[in-house]
Image (cartoon, rainbow, N blue to C red):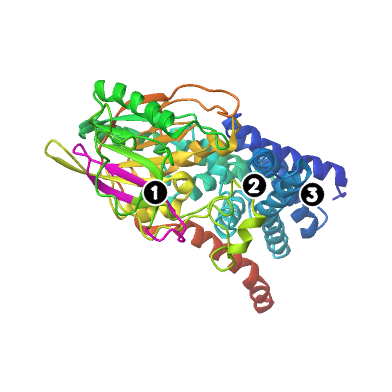
Amino acid sequence: MAHTPRWILLTLSVLSGLSWVVAGPDVDVWPLAYVGLVPLLVAVERARSTRQAALCGWVAGLVANVLGFAWIIELLTRHAAMPGLLGALALLLLAAYQALVFMLFAAAVRGLRERSRARGAAWPLWALAPACMVAFEFLVPFLFPWYLAISQAWVPPMIQLAEFTGPLGVTAVIALVNGGLGDALLGPSRRRRVLGGVAAALALVGALGFGTWRMAAIDEARAQAPTLRVGVVQTHVPMNSPPAGADQLAALQAASAELDAAGAELLVWPESSYPYALPRAMAADAAPESPYRVRDGFDAPVIFGAVTRAPERERPPWNSALMLDQSGRVTGRYDKMHLLLFGEYIPLLDTFPSLRALLPEAASHFARGQAVTSFPLRVGERDLRLGPLICYEDILPRFGRTLAAEHPHLLVNLTNDAWFGDSAEPWQHLALSVLRAVELRADMVRAVNPGVSAFIDASGRVRAQTFSLDPAREQRPPATLLVDAALLEGGHTFYARAGDWLGYLCALAVLGAWLLWPALTRRRA
């Protein structure tokens, strides 16, 4: 076979990387996901060596991550006072690292194809592509986690497998379809080409059919479940120039009063929306005449985000979610456990406090929460459990599984995405959070400053959503949602119990085949 020119291989790799940006939020041409790996698979097959195939994969991953995370430049220049060139360099470094998934995927596919071809026939791409992609999505840790599954967030039937596999199962279907199409193009015989096309069709139709059937069952369960009317308040508070605390609190209270009058049984405010620090020992709301009172003008229970502090002022504060019941008692507090590196905690700062002088003013340092919890809510004769998640905890499958042990009737996410302006990030964040509702089979409400707030049902449908804006450039009064959440007891799914079994299985299969193949071939020889 004549060698394919390097520029063609790189062009195919770039096209593959571009396809994932176009398939995902907020461009949302989701069908492209089912052909997006095909150009890369062609490049991998036509490369001169495994090393060149790995380079093709790295280029595809670099393009996908640079374009998908382009908002990082503005994040760093605006909030970390970083020059634009340094911000671009930081993005390139992050993208170069996160491109390892595609690089290792390409190297493994090429290497295993070569080894199996030497013993007869190359292993089919419809089998190798899902195994390798799932293995390396599982094995490579990310600062900002994402999966190929993100492309299907707005296609509910295609994400129902997440109840059993988490996002990795959705990735597996996408990669299997791409691998089957790759076999249909590259197969050495008519039989292999037909088999590839059949495998792709069966995977696509099977996932769609199963998802449609499973959604009907979940819809029936939701229709029979009791409901809770939830009012969500979305603020539009900029990070660097927030309004006066009294004005910010008054806007929250006014929007909450309208929702309360409309019948809300629970109100939810965004992360860190309460503008004053609160004591850890707080047992009840402030007095009615106090300017620090939370519940003013409404009676419904409220979950809100606030900074909480211990009496020892030298200790770092906590990023907390608190719940006040109808009487104003604090009935729950959750402290965020998964803190964002540099955004919410600074490594070694507790040991070397002098590092603070070197950091931008926007850099925060919070204490880490120690345990998940659920908030109790009694509505009529019903005792409910509400599962709080703060900010990007709703994009972490492992955190969702931890929260599943509480068996929440409703997932409640409080987020502050004002860091990212009016970029793709709020939509990417929403897309990733959709999978938690499916994995736990529980409805979710999201209160997000400054958007996108949303209501997601237990099948992963986004039933209601607001919008996203940059509050530093556009000022608006709070937006609201009023939704009826079905109260299924979540966390009883196979994925909640078994975790990332598919990731372990694929990692063992791929690494085992790679490491053991030479020994097996020598023994056969």
Examine the structure image and report whether residue 321 is included in the region drawn in magenta: yes
Say few, some or many: other residues with alpha carbon within 10 Å of mark 3 (under 14 / 14 to 19 / 20 or more).
many
Q: Amino acid at mark 3?
A: Arg
Q: Residue 68, located in which quarter of the rendered image?
A: top right
Specify start and end residues of the magenta stretch as a single range.
311-333
Kindly report the distance in space between the C-alpha atoms of the residues bearing marks 1 and 3. Answer: 53 Å
Count the labels in the image.
3
Where residue 157 appears, as percent x and y from the top left, is: 43, 34
Residue 257 position, x and y percent, is 29, 24
| Residue placed most toward the observer, 88 or 509 | 88
For discs 1 and 3, the disc positioned in front in the rendered view:
1
Of marks 3 and 2, which one's residue comes earlier in the chain? Answer: 3
Question: Amino acid under label 2?
Answer: Arg
Q: Residue 467: x, y in percent?
A: 49, 25
Label 3 sits on residue: 46
Which residue is the site of mark 2?
192
Where, quadrant-wise, is the C terminus in this rendering?
bottom right
Q: Are marks 3 and 2 in contact (CB under 8 Å)?
A: no
Which of 149/127 is in front? 149
Q: Secondary structure at mark 3?
A: helix
Dot 1: what SS?
strand
Task: Say if residue 116 shows up in the picture.
Answer: yes
Earlier along the polypeptide chain: callout 1 or callout 3? 3
Q: What distance separates the C-alpha of mark 3 from that of mark 2?
A: 18 Å
